[in-house]
Image (spheres, rainbow, N blue to C red):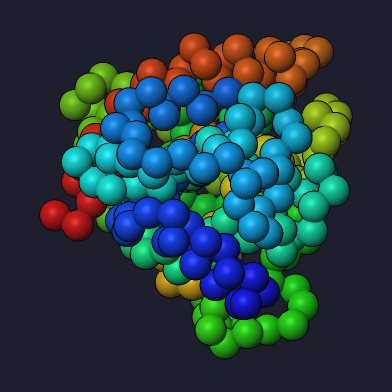
Amino acid sequence: MLERTKQTVSFIKNKFDFTPEAGIILGTGLGGLVKDIKTEHVLNYEDIPNFPVSTVEGHHGRLIFGELGGKKIVAMQGRFHYYEGYSMMEVTFPVRVMKYLGIKTLLVSNASGGVNPNYEIGDLMILDDHINLIPNPLIGVHNNNFGARFPDMSEPYDKALIVKALEIAKKHNIKTQVGCYVGTTGPTLETPKEYQYFRIIGGDTVGMSTTPEVIVARQMGIPCFAISIITDLGVPGKIVEVTHENVQNVAKEAEPKMTILMEKLISQLYI
């Protein structure tokens, strides 16, 4: 894995001279944030050695290098999921590549289903914790170059970044929740009893991504910030039939709020 990572990083660096300060992973229906990036370079996943290719609608499959909020960033417009048939090593491979490219912070977005009865469709939820029910991406042969064999996860999401994000949300009148994300394999959406179970064990939202990427980032010492757009509700009395198209549409409607928050937060990094 280390050699593959170095090979991919070498390929990118030979294409152009660019050292990103922050990495961004954009989830379902959230790829529109790239419109605000002052793009300098774009690489399609299919053209990058060792990179998987996103197969999910709403995930474009491009690595974008540019400036956002006055900072140099690399953004994944589309991510990879365990349910696509990729190994956890493949799902999280881009995080390792971004670390070796130079990122100091990882920002992640996703679309998720709310199980907290106080949430409404279209709300933004800042993650302050997670419950990972996807196979752990660190299972397998360990390489000390990537970090500890048993990384500490007492602060999966950076508390200082959460405070800054809440201040930004308040200033811009953006309704924001703070809670725990449950990561599941998918690709089925949840049954009513599964929603109930996720709430009982401490979840506020549920989705099919994010936790593996954050686990790998934390192993490598990268501070993380993550935000969910609540696209549907798994609350008794509010559960309705949901399609992937519904999820995409709600995410796109709420995306401008997320864009403001993310851009302003990035502008305050390393100050």
Q: Give whichever of 19, 175 is nearer the camera.
A: 19
Q: Within the image, what quadrant is residue 172 found in? A: top left
> What percent of the width, then of the height, locates residue 186?
81, 39
Residue at 34 percent across and 47 percent down: it is: 73
Residue 200, relative to residue 192: is it above or below?
Answer: below
- The answer to whether residue 120 is seen in the rendering is no
Quarter of the figure with the C terminus: bottom left
Residue at 37 percent across and 64 percent down: it is: 102
> What percent of the width, then of the height, locates residue 82?
77, 49
Q: Within the image, what quadrant is residue 231 found in? A: top right
Looking at the image, residue 72 sits to the left or right of residue 244; the answer is left
Quarter of the figure with the N terminus: bottom right
The number of numbered badges drawn on the structure is: 0
Q: Give whichever of 258, 50 is nearer the camera.
A: 50
Residue at 38 percent across and 18 percent down: it is: 256
Q: Within the image, what quadrant is residue 75 found in? A: top left
> What percent of the width, then of the height, locates residue 170?
24, 28
Looking at the image, residue 56 sits to the left or right of residue 251; the answer is right
Residue 194, relative to residue 118: is it above or below?
Answer: below
